[in-house]
Image: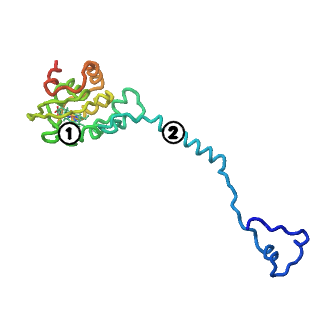
Amino acid sequence: MSEKTPKPEAEDRKPFAPDSEFAAMRRENADPDEKVQPLPWFFIMFLGAMGMWGAFYIASTPSGEASAYGDQRTVSTLRPPVAAAGAVAAVDGKQIYGAKCAACHQASGLGVSGVFPPLAGAEWVLGDEKVLVSILLHGVQGEIVVKGNTYKGVMPAFGTLPDAEIAAVLSYVRSDWGNQAPPITAATVQSQREATKGQVGAYNGGAALTALKP
Ligand code: HEC
């Protein structure tokens, strides 16, 4: 009952007989009725701002990167750059190895028989540093002999890593699992990057790598 039955002015104040229709209307409250409650203006503005921020975030987040080897960033990429001398020391070669190489060459550096060649005691790791840097910069695809066994797989290129990270991971690889070869500096990586600028795609196996030696 949303509309009240109009009552004459005088009738209103008159006591009614307890069983009369008007007595019941005085005794009881009117039916509750739903009111429109608009959202507070600041909440609407907050929602609008969140929506706009979401659209901006989606539009500005890069999504076109190759996903073949997962997220290529390492902790040192995300870290703000440190002063030049400190930067080399801040890069942890073992950590990069765990993130980028161990899936194939294994944490033990022994590789997987017949599929991924070993790095422990491998002549390519302990030999000419320029050849080793080139392997990382451009990758290898084709026949390569490592410790007497022939492999024919695909070693991905890691040229997108900064010089300091390539130097750090190679220095690590040259010093663990009984390997004893001098570390490789970022400067060496940088000059080899310059020298092999013309290389397109991966090196064609061990023969192409041997040809790099001076
Ligand atoms: C997707 C698997 C894969 C990943 C990841 C990978 N490699 Fe390799 N790597 C190979 C394969 C396969 C070969 C042999 C290439 C061939 O057969 O032509 C190879 C060859 C090599 C060689 C020369 C052969 C030898 O055993 O000495 C070195 C050095 C090397 N990789 C180092 C690394 C380092 C350092 C990393 C990490 C930054 C890495 N690789 C990551 C698969 C991989």
- Pointers 2 and 1 in contact (C-beta within 8 Å): no
Question: Residue 105, labelled with which disc?
Answer: 1
- Ligand 1's quadrant is top left
Look at the picture and state if 211 lies above or below 158. above
Relative to 44, is 181 on the left or the right?
left
User: Local crowd at mark 2 within 10 Å, few (<14), some, or many (≥20)?
Assistant: few
- Pinpoint residue 50: horizontal percent, then vertical percent: 55, 43
* Front residue (pair 210, 214): 210
Specify few, some or many for label 1: CA neighbours under 10 Å numbering under 14, 14-19, or 20 or more: many
Separation (CA) of disc 2 from disc 1: 42 Å
Look at the numbered disc 1 and give the secondary structure of its residue.
helix
In the image, the residue with mark 1 has its CB under 8 Å from the nearest atom of ligand 1:
yes
Residue at image position (29%, 37%) is: 68
- First in residue order: circle 2 vs circle 1: 2
Q: Considering the image in quadrants, where does the N terminus appear?
A: bottom right
Q: Closer to the camera: disc 2 or disc 1?
A: 2
The x and y percentages for residue 190 are 30, 22
Q: Which corner quadrant of the image does residue 122 belong to? A: top left
- 44 or 35, nearer to the observer: 35
Secondary structure category for the residue under label 2: helix
Position of residue 94 measured from the top left corner of the image (x, y, whole percent): 27, 38
Q: Which amino acid, mark 1?
A: His
Q: Is mark 2 within 8 Å of ligand 1?
A: no
**Percent position (x, y) of residue 26?**
81, 73
Q: Which residue is mark 2?
A: 55
Q: Amino acid at mark 2?
A: Ala
Classify residue 122 as left or right of residue 88.
left
Instruction: Decide which of 47, 182 is in the foreground and name it.
Output: 47
